[in-house]
Image (tube, rainbow, N blue to C red):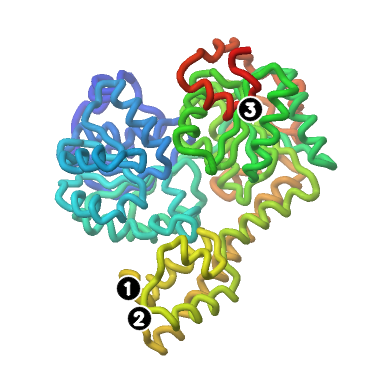
Amino acid sequence: MLRPRLHEQLNNHFGFSEFREGQKEIIEDVLQGQDVLGILPTGVGKSLCYQLPSLLTHGTTLVVSPLISLMVDQVKQLKAKGYKSVIALNSFMDYRERTAALNQLNNYRLIYVSPEMLQNPKIEKVLHTLDVSLFVIDEAHCISQWGHEFRTDYLKMDQVIEKVGNPPVLALSATAAPDVQKDIKKQLGRTNMIDHIYPMDKPNISFAVEFHEHQDDKKARIRHMLAAQRLPTMIYFSSRQSAELVAEELNIALDQRVAFYHGGMEQMDRLLVQQQFMKDQLDVICCTSAFGMGVDKPNIRRVIHYHFPTQVESYIQEIGRAGRDGKPCASIVLYTPHDQLLPKMLMERELPEEAAIERLFAWLTNHSALLPDEEMHEQLQLSESQWNFLKYQLEETQVIFQNTIMFDVELWSKAKMQIRTNLRKRWNYKNEKFHQMRDWLYFTGCRRLKLYEPFQEGVRDAEVDCCDHCGFIIDDAQLMEEEAAGVITHNSWDVRLKRIFLQESINE
């Protein structure tokens, strides 16, 4: 039943007097028990679309979230606002903590969980006992972007939804082209979801692409930009090593606080760096794509891409972290002729070659069951992502059932054909996305119009200088300067900070 006086409830629970674009419309449909796909611009406040309904409905709201840091941050914010019946089930929990949480899970109204955790038998067993009133997929583009190879548990969400009683489904994202929207619905088994699709473009961001001859030229350019204006800045890299090396060079060359962040760091170290950046105790983050999703820092003024991503969707997500306060911000992509080699290498690490299919079935012939994933990687000489793709295909074609290999000549023949077909489709899809991104870099017209062309018809009027084609010059940009934040205080993590920030001594 639709709850009246939504504005009153919004003010009572969250202290806001008005809804932002799209929030009220989505919430109304959710409260009516509808399946909803919501595409809202970064910074609008997508999480409110399920947080408010969780307070107004019976039962439990289950939120599938892609990153531990994102879950932890949202739980922390909600508890600070007085919302106590919220929990995040994640790998940070030790055995005793997780057991205690599972024993009282029915006391929580809002539960955050990763897609991988949903496949944990103990968690799955407890979730089936809950009265789930709303099933939410936050950052739903991950289903299409990561689900087909890197994190295939995203493609099992339809099974989980059925097991918890087929509650209404809400899928939310800031970036999803029509083909991704279609894939989200297909993978969730909800092809008739109500669409609430809003413009994704940011009127307060300016765009620039700069071509350089060598990597050293890019580093010099970054040093110049950072020295000219001390502003909260994110620099994106496709290489963990490059992120670390450039962070070290910037720390030496500039009187600014620079840290690196990537998926190879320990989880606690990543959370530490993220919190320092959020609290204005860092000026610059040199990061990979592992950083940024759900980071609600309002005053990021620049997003610099040292390497360009493999697809436009990723680029839009990453620049969406700038200017969440609505004030002027800028995106700068630095490009050299050899830069396109790295995205190609990353794509090759994500998907196997066709020859790997023959190696796989040759291995299956001599075994009765799959080995642990780590051993499968090693024996078949595959990356984690490549193996995840093949393993999911084996499950879908019923060659394996609960890790047991099903021997059937006809089944195997059909499975090989199906896996080859799906592999070629994914290669074609990824190559198409890569060329779309590269074409944007070389485009000689308005970058804003070209960037959002696959997602929507037209763009809103820019509130700042538009792009380098339309007269934007980053060196002349008047980006709002922030007051210098206080120095990092001395505490028990001094040694850790020294290693992460690459400084000789924190006490200096």
Taking the image as drawn, is residue 190 in sight? no
**How far apart in space, not on screen, are marks 3 and 2 (Cα)?**
52 Å
The residue mark sitting in front, 3 or 2, is 3
In the image, residue 1 lies at what x, y percent?
16, 40
Farthest-out residue, bottom: 409
Taking the image as drawn, is residue 453 in sight? yes
For the residues labelled 2 and 1, say whether their Cβ atoms are less than 8 Å apart.
yes
Which secondary structure lies at badge 1? strand
- Tell me which label, 3 or 1, sits earlier in the chain: 1
**How far apart in space, not on screen, are marks 2 and 1 (Cα)?**
7 Å
In the image, residue 103 lies at what x, y percent?
16, 42
| In the image: residue 350, left or right of residue 471 | left
What residue did someone put label 1 on?
401
The amino acid on which the numbered mark 1 sits, given as a three-letter code, is Phe
Which secondary structure lies at badge 3? loop
The amino acid on which the numbered mark 2 sits, given as a three-letter code, is Met
194 vs 432, nearest the viewer: 432
What residue did someone put label 2 on?
406
In the image, residue 344 lies at what x, y percent?
67, 57
407 vs 167, nearest the viewer: 407
Marker count (numbered): 3
